[in-house]
Amino acid sequence: MFPFFNPRAQIPFYATEDNFFLGPISQQVRQATPKGDYNVRVSFNQYGFRDTKDLRDSSERDIFVVGDSFSMGWGVEENQRYSNLLESKLARRVFNISIPEDIRGYSKLVKYAEKCGGTVRNLIIGVCLENDLRDYSDGRTGAEIFQEGKTGKSSVSLVEKTRAWLWSHSALYIGVSYTFQKSPLVRHLLESIGVARNIDRLIPNNEFNEQVLMSSRDELVKLATNYDSVILVIPSRALWHGKKMEEENKVHERFVRFLRQAGLRTVDMKPEFEQGGQPLSNYFSTDPHWNPSGHAAAARALLAAFQTR
């Protein structure tokens, strides 16, 4: 089977002993979707981050970006990420230490970066409203929750567990998936019978819960107040697509209000995207992440925020 479809070529994030995720140390891997939205090579440095710079070279003037897969640049080339674009426009070095995690995981990533020699003073925290909002009072990390899912202790369906296992073990499954899903007609058929997931199944739906919003805010405050921080609010695609747009809007607006009431400097991408009249043009068509246009818009908004400080 071609190396292109080798399960080992997919991004093998791993959980550390301190219960947070990192990328594969000093490796280059492939990141692609069978549906054709992207096909990029992703390089990880000696620390497990998608960044070419050495943390030990950082200074108090530099900026660090922490967040989940959006901020890591899922599906886009490294130089297309908002962190790289901001670096070129602001003429200040920007270190990207983002890994698919949650708010508690972001704190662990920052501490890990500092332990590795990073000088973190200025911090951009990319908060994803698709999956970062939860009740953090359980004390668990995202890595612990993920491990519970792998061992059968979560509510993840058997179909999803089987798909995840095949994706990480079967080159044949990956090859067939890429071949079949290139055809929109075949892809829609596979989605209709549950073999493939359409965009609606890829996006978690938020339910309005003030306890969840306050807990998420409190967890974010714990991290942000230790640094000169800017919160980048990454809106869920479900704001403009699907059957729960009204509830998603209520969740989004209330959470942003909570952040600002807590005194956190906040850059909200929802009005930035809506200003152009086509907010979904900033997302991939069959994947919930930002395309290069979304990253460019975020870089512009962050640049304006830094220039007005």
Image: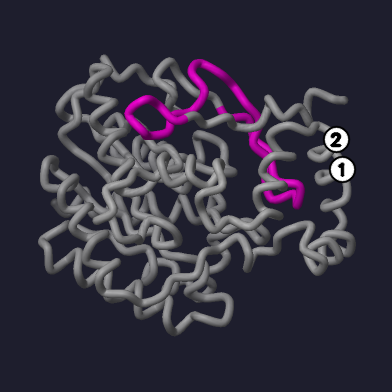
Q: Position of residue 13 (x, y in %)?
A: 52, 31
Counting every numbered tag in the picture gives 2
The residue at which mark 1 appears reads as 176
Q: Residue at x 28, y 53 (%)?
A: 138
Q: Is residue 18 above or below residue 153?
A: above
Which quadrant is home to the N terminus? top right
Provide the residue designation for mark 2. 172
Q: Residues within 10 Å of mark 1 (few under 14, many from 20)?
A: few
Which amino acid lies under the numbered mark 2 shown in the image of this protein? Answer: Leu
Residue 285 location (% of width, % of height): 66, 61
Q: Secondary structure at mark 1?
A: helix
In this view, 48 is above or below 222 = above
Say left or right for 63 vs 46: left
Q: Which residues are magenta?
A: 15-42
Amino acid beneath label 1: Val
* Residues tagged 2 and 1 counted as in contact (Cβ below 8 A): yes
Give 61 or 251, whichever is nearer the viewer. Answer: 251
Percent from the top left, x then y, of residue 11? Answer: 59, 32
Q: State the image quarter where residue 127 is shown.
A: bottom left
